[in-house]
Amino acid sequence: MSMTGRTKIAIVGAGAIGSGVGAVLHQAGQDVTLIGRPDHVAAIKRRGLLMQEGEREVALAVRAAERLDFRPDLLLFATKVQDVEEACKQSLPHAQDVPAVM
């Protein structure tokens, strides 16, 4: 758990599904970091994670990175099937014995 008492959650795969799940978890008060492709990470860092809530667009201040560089409490994989193996290999150094969901 983070120093704030929130669960540190890393979501590998910051596409539509990963970003949507990350947004919900972030809004619920969890400590979320999205791991994604360089262009998407850059956009999140520049403008926030843009989500549509009814008729309005909301920018959420969610952390984003190109690689997992910390030990999370929980690791969620939301990658395309063809990217799962590589995502697991890249995440392993920081995810030993961390619960993971695919």
Image (cartoon, rainbow, N blue to C red):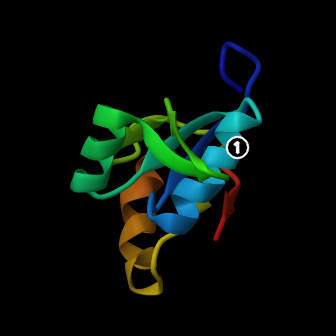
- How many numbered marks are there? 1
Rate crowding at label 1 as few (under 14), some (14 to 19) or many (20 or more) other CA atoms within 10 Å: some
Residue 41 at x, y percent in the picture: 31, 46
- Quadrant of the image containing the C terminus: bottom right
Residue matched to label 1: 25
Residue 96 makes an appearance in the image: no
Q: Residue at x 70, y 43 (%)?
A: 25
Residue 35 at x, y percent in the picture: 42, 50
Front-most of 94 and 11? 11
Front-most of 86 and 54? 54
Residue 46 at x, y percent in the picture: 28, 33
Displayed quadrant of residue 21: bottom right
Front-most of 46 and 7? 46
Q: Left or right of 24: which side holds 88?
A: left
Displayed quadrant of residue 78: bottom right
Residue 28 at x, y percent in the picture: 77, 36
Q: Residue at x 67, y 13 (%)?
A: 3
Above or below residue 16? Residue 72 is above
Q: Residue furthest top?
A: 3
Above or below residue 57? Residue 85 is below
Q: Residue furthest front?
A: 55
